[in-house]
């Protein structure tokens, strides 16, 4: 609809310019006007404003003027109707788009809300897309929204506004990632989001070390400093390059290329009678190796013993090649 209206708009503009050109040339050579007077006469004739002609017209000029007025009435009428149609159709399309996005957001639950679609926000979105985790982005820059709105659910507005957070479904969300470059803005969002959803897991970006404590006090569960992580990573590449390169190989790039998986014990206990890691026997079943155990109280155990007793609501960290991870997920119906 918009493309059709736009093509008609181009036609209307072309016809209008053609009439202006035709009228200016006609008055220049038929009435012997100067170019400026000819253009002026053409415009006031097309606009039918009733201004007096530059100089008296002879019969030939009057006949030319009659034809110019008739042509102008039809062409300008057509141009106005096309312009009106274009504006109304564009407005209707925008309203339809916003309604469609709103309905999609209202249907989400346990999703992720990302505040800010800068470099860090975009990286977070790419990872969530790879893992097919639903998310909504709050962004106030219209240019960014128009550029990426085909693939991303956006809420246009200021993340510091409670109504904007509500529109993004913060009350039904499971996670919040606030990735704005300003620490004060992130802190304000963390405070607001924690009030709106006490169970929300909040991950905040911080630029300054002094902001970390404030963000934790404000209600953030995790605080990430991208600049510090980047510096540590580069320094580690100098000190132990092979180990860091190997760790990079374990980087989770997507559902079908990951080498690491986090699995809740309940995913196993529903199908296998398991009291210890030995009972799971994942190495034999899938080829995967358990390299970590997360207790219900959040304690992390690296390279746990085979006889470690499994507790409800605990998790295991599993290492394997992509095909082994895939076999694990398919065998225990994970994901």
Image: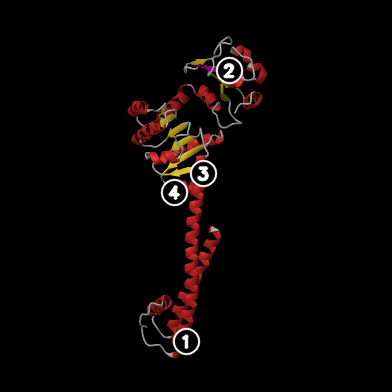
What's the residue at 51%, 34% (across, down)? 109
Q: Earlier in the sequence, mark 2 or mark 3?
A: 3
Q: Earlier in the sequence, mark 2 or mark 4?
A: 4
Quadrant containing the N terminus in the rendered view: bottom right
Separation of disc 4 and disc 1 at Cα?
51 Å
Separation of disc 3 and disc 1 at Cα?
60 Å
Protein image colouring = secondary structure
Q: Can you identify the residue that label 1 sits on?
A: 63
Q: Main secondary structure of the magenta part?
A: strand
Separation of disc 2 and disc 3 at Cα?
41 Å
Q: Can you identify the residue that label 2 sits on?
A: 290
Q: Which residues are magenta?
A: 291-295
Q: Residue furthest bottom?
A: 59
Element type at mark 3: helix
Separation of disc 1 and disc 2 at Cα?
94 Å
Whether the magenta-drawn stretch holds residue 237 is answered as no
Give how far across and how far down residue 54 sits, in percent.
36, 83
Whether residue 84 can be seen here: yes
Element type at mark 4: helix
Separation of disc 4 and disc 3 at Cα?
23 Å
- Vertical order, 49 against 5 (above or below): below
- Vertical order, 156 against 282 (above or below): below
- Vertical order, 323 against 168 (above or below): above
Is residue 19 or residue 269 the one in the foreground? Answer: 269
Q: Can you identify the residue that label 3 sits on?
A: 103
Q: Earlier in the sequence, mark 4 or mark 1?
A: 1
The reply to whether callout 4 and callout 1 are in contact (CB within 8 Å) is no
Q: Can you identify the residue that label 4 sits on?
A: 143
Task: Tell me which corner region of the image, top left, top right, bottom left or bottom right, holds residue 325.
Answer: top right
């Amino acid at each position: 609809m918009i493309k059709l209206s736009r093509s008609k708009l181009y036609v209307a503009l072309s016809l209008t310019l053609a009439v202006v050109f035709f009228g200016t040339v006609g008055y220049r050579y038929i009435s012997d006007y100067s170019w400026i007077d000819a253009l002026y006469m053409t415009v006031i004739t097309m606009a039918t404003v009733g201004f007096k002609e530059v100089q008296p017209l002879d019969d030939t000029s009057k006949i030319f003027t009659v034809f110019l007025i008739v042509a102008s009435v039809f062409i300008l009428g057509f141009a106005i109707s096309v312009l009106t149609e274009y504006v109304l159709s564009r407005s209707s399309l925008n309203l339809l788009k916003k309604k469609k996005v709103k309905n999609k957001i209202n249907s989400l639950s346990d999703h992720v809300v990302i505040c800010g679609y800068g470099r860090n926000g975009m990286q977070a979105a790419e990872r969530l897309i790879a893992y097919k985790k639903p998310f909504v982005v709050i962004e106030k820059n219209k240019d960014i929204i128009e550029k990426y709105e085909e693939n991303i659910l956006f809420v246009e507005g200021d993340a510091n506004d409670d109504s904007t957070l509500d529109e993004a479904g913060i009350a039904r969300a499971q996670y919040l990632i606030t990735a704005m470059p300003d620490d004060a803005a992130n802190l304000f969002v963390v405070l607001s989001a924690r009030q709106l959803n006490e169970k929300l897991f909040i991950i905040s970006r911080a630029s300054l070390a002094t902001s970390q404590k404030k963000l934790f006090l404000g209600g953030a569960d995790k605080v990430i400093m991208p600049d510090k992580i980047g510096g540590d990573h580069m320094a580690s590449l100098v000190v132990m390059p092979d180990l860091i390169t190997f760790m990079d190989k374990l980087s989770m790039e997507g559902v079908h290329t990951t080498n690491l998986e986090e699995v809740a014990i309940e995913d196993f206990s529903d199908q296998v009678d398991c009291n210890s890691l030995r009972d799971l026997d994942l190495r034999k079943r899938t080829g995967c190796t358990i390299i970590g155990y997360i207790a219900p109280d959040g304690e992390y155990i690296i390279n746990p013993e085979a006889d470690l007793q499994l507790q409800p609501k605990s998790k295991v960290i599993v290492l394997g090649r992509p095909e082994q991870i895939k076999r694990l997920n398919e065998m225990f119906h994970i994901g």
